[in-house]
Structure formats: C-alpha cells, structure tokens
Amino acid sequence: MRAVLTIAGLSLLTGQALADDIEIQVGIPRLDVAEYHRPYVAIWIAKPDHSVVSNIAVWYQQGETGEGKGETWLKDIRQWWRRTGRDLDMPVDGISGPTKAPGTHDIVLPVDKGIFGDLQPGEYQLVVEAAREVGGRELVSVPFSWPLKPGDLTASGERELGKVTLRLAGN
C-alpha cells in the first residue's frame, strides 16, 4: 500500500512540475527552392485589438555579412515591425536569437514568471510572423484565453511557417 501511495505521489509531483511551463512550438518548413535563406521570425503576444503585450522571440541574422547587417532587414517582418519592432533597440536580451533551420523549434517559458507571470486574465493571440529573403512573408495567429487550459492550441501556415502550437507543458 505504501509503494502505491509513493508512486501516486511522485506522479502528482512530476505532473505539477511539467505543468509549470508554457511550450511554444514553431515549425519552419523545408522548401525546395533554388535560393533558400533562413527566415526572420518574430513571436509575440497581442491583445484582440492587435496591440502588443510582450515580445517572446525575434530570430534574425545577428552578424554582419557582405550583404550588410541583419538588423537592416528586420523591417521585412512587417506586422511585428509596425507594432513593436521599430521601437526596440536590437538585440534585446532574452528575445533576440539567430535564424533557425527548417524543423520544429521549441520555446519553453515559465507560467508564473516573466511574460506569462504578468499576464492578466483575458483573451490574447500568440502571433508568429516569418519573412524570408527571395521568399515570402507569412503570419499565423493562435487565439487563446489566459489562464491557459490544458490541450494544444494550433494554427498552421501555408508556405513560410509550418504548425504553430501553444500548450501547457506536460499536457
């Protein structure tokens, strides 16, 4: 009997620890094109009126190449640039990161600290926008209510973005 209770207790503790995080998955599809460049991607939380609550990530070319400095092209992420990007002094610690290769990329954030710790109950959107040199631009929104309920909330792009998922980790 004691062993059964211990196992049940461990399961509850493990479940609680996993549920303390928010997991965001962003798919970047592999495209069969002659000239491929990794996309610039911005991820943020917006209110229903599209005002920005908080930036989560901006992935861009952070070094300088023969084509110039990567920050020059951040304005190609048009919606993000108009709503918040042009007011930021890039790079921003904890938000900026290098471009990502095709695949699924995870961002894990704590529920009770930072962006989600300060979020008031209500309706929001997780917005992901991608823009690619010699390619297109695409924006995907995942509406959600805060506090987040267990289960996956997803949306998918058609070309520049793949599946975008928002979930409580461990669910």
Image (spheres, rainbow, N blue to C red):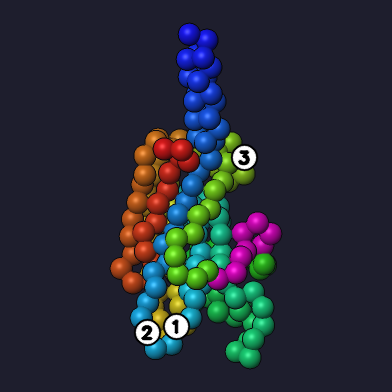
- Does residue 46 show up? no
Number of other residues with Cα within 10 Å of mark 2, as a class: few under 14, some 14 to 19, many 20 or more: few
146 vs 60: above or below: above
Mark 3, residues whose alpha carbon is within 10 Å: few (<14), some, or many (≥20)? few
In x, y percent, where is residue 140? 37, 61
Magenta: main secondary structure equals loop
> In front here: 17 or 56?
17
Sort mark 1 into few (<14), some (14-19) or many (20+) by Cα contacts within 10 Å. Answer: few
Q: Which residue is mark 2?
A: 33
* Label 3–label 1 contact, CB within 8 A: no
Q: Amino acid at mark 1?
A: Tyr
State which region is magenta: 92-99
Disc marking residue 36: 1
Q: Looking at the image, which residue is at 61% across and 65% down?
A: 97
- Check contact, mark 2 vs mark 1: CB within 8 A: yes
Position in image of residue 3 (x %, y %) = 51, 14
| Residue 95 in picture, x, y percent from top left | 61, 59
Q: Which residue corresponds to mark 3?
A: 113
Mark in the foreground, 3 or 1: 1
- What type is the residue that disc 2 sits on? Val
Q: Position of residue 61 (x, y in %)?
A: 60, 75
